[in-house]
Image (cartoon, helix red, strand yellow):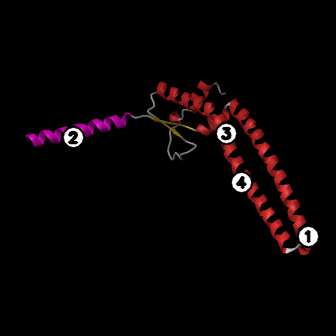
Amino acid sequence: MKKLLTTFSVIALMMTGNLAIAQAKVGYVNFTELVKALPEAAQIKGKVDAYSNQYMDQLKAMYSEYQAKGQEFQKQQASMTDAIRTAKQEELVNLQKRMNDYQNEAQQKVAARTDELSKPLLEKVRAAIALVAKEKGYTYVLDSSQTDLIVSPAGDDLAADVKAKLGIK
């Protein structure tokens, strides 16, 4: 009897679990397209481009200096003493290292600036998606820009509803 009761309990739990899974509603949106569709995205891109250009201008100046010193070294290399040649080579190597370090630092700063400026916009889109999902009874919403949806019914694409929530036409 005890075995029968245990078996019955396990079967009942399995059936309950299957019912819960069957009720999960999954929708999807292309998060990247939603973000790009907002007017604020263009403003952020403009700010990031301007910020990035500051670093690019400095990097171009460093590169010009490197080229000029390299060409000068090439022309005068034959008439240099070993000590001067070694010093000039070290100077070129150090300049190249400074350029690489500066480029890496610039990339990190531009990425941080992009994240800083984009964070409120991304949160706004996520909040709109969560609101639409709740209103429509969706348990899960996938980002179709990150996942290939092999089969997806048009009715589960929440992009139009989210755009309406965000005021995007």
**Amino acid type, residue under disc 1 in the picture:** Gln
Q: Is residue 3 magenta?
A: yes
Q: Which residue is mark 4?
A: 101
Answer whether labels 2 and 3 touch (C-beta < 8 Å).
Answer: no
Alpha carbons under labels 3 and 1: distance apart: 45 Å
Q: Which residues are magenta?
A: 1-23
Alpha carbons under labels 2 and 4: distance apart: 63 Å
- Residue at point 82% right, 47% down? 57
Q: Earlier in the sequence, mark 3 or mark 1?
A: 1
Main SS of residues in magenta: helix
- Residue at point 58% right, 33% down? 159
In the image, which disc is placed on residue 76?
A: 1
Task: Give the x, y percent position of residue 84.
Answer: 85, 69
- Give the quadrant of residue 128: top right
Answer whether labels 2 and 1 touch (C-beta < 8 Å).
Answer: no
Closer to the observer: label 2 or label 4? Answer: 4
Q: Earlier in the sequence, mark 2 or mark 1?
A: 2
Q: Is residue 140 left or right of residue 22?
A: right
Q: Is residue 85 left or right of residue 111?
A: right
Query: In what quadrant of the picture does the C terminus appear?
Result: top right
- Choose between 69 and 103: the one closer to the eye: 69
Q: Which residue is mark 2?
A: 11
Closer to the observer: label 2 or label 3? Answer: 3
For the residue carrying disc 2, how many other residues have a C-alpha within 10 Å: few (<14), some (14-19), or many (20+)? Answer: few
For the residue carrying disc 4, how many other residues have a C-alpha within 10 Å: few (<14), some (14-19), or many (20+)? Answer: few
In the image, which disc is placed on residue 114?
A: 3
